Image: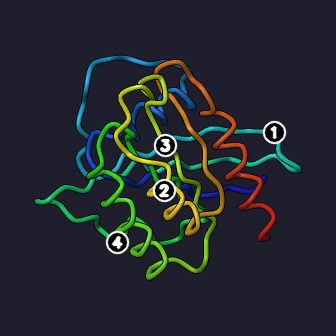
Amino acid sequence: MKAKKICMIGAFAVGKTSLVRRFVESIFTEKYHTTIGVKISKKFIDSTPEPVQLLVWDIEGKDVYTNINVSYLRGASGAMLVVDGTRPDSLEVANELRTLISDNCNDIPVVLMLNKCDLEDDWVIGPDKIATLEQKVSTLFKSSAKDGKNVDEAFQRLAELMLERD
């Protein structure tokens, strides 16, 4: 069975950890815990063309005081770039991080997760700005870690894209 490393990357507090917990453990909690460094979770999926073990690296969020440790990206087969639709700064950070991925990884598939779609009425990021970033990624999902919308589907699609490159 193949193992594939996925890096969860984005600004702080965009919901990376909540998405991982929803995907791996099928749970959601309102309680916020900041990630320090990286937390690695595993999930086996067999709904792809071949079974695969996903190693999900939940990387601490980027903010004005913290840069992403590029060594965490080493060996990644794919990346999940997470944006909080209620925070325009998270889209700016995502653009920076997309460049970081391009500069440090060999053309890996990147899925853009527009998280917190359960709060879509509160989104302040316009479709034009989303479209600009969408051109730089493999595919886009509007997701909600809270209600589970498109979480499994996004990880499934990323797994398929990674396996296609083998």
Residue furthest right in the image: 49
Callout 4 crowding tier (Cα within 10 Å): few <14, some 14–19, many ≥20: few
- Among numbered discs 1 and 3, the one appearing first in the sequence: 1
> Which mark is drawn over residue 114?
3
Q: Is mark 3 on a helix, strand or loop?
A: strand
Contact (Cβ within 8 Å) of mark 3 with mark 4: no
- Among numbered discs 3 and 4, the one appearing first in the sequence: 4
Look at label 4 and name its amino acid. Val
- Among numbered discs 4 and 2, the one appearing first in the sequence: 4
In the picture, which quadrant includes the C terminus?
bottom right
Determine the residue positioned at 24% across, 30% down. 33
Q: Left or right of 87: which side holds 143?
A: right
Q: Left or right of 49: which side holds 100?
A: left
Mark 4 to mark 2 CA distance (whole Å): 29 Å
Mark 1 to mark 3 CA distance (whole Å): 25 Å
> Which mark is drawn over residue 128?
2
Q: Is mark 4 on a helix, strand or loop?
A: helix
The residue closer to the viewer here, 44 or 47, is 47
Callout 1 crowding tier (Cα within 10 Å): few <14, some 14–19, many ≥20: few
Q: Which of marks 3 and 4 is in front?
A: 3
Determine the residue positioned at 36% across, 55% down. 91
Look at label 1 and name its amino acid. Asp
Callout 3 crowding tier (Cα within 10 Å): few <14, some 14–19, many ≥20: many
Callout 2 crowding tier (Cα within 10 Å): few <14, some 14–19, many ≥20: few
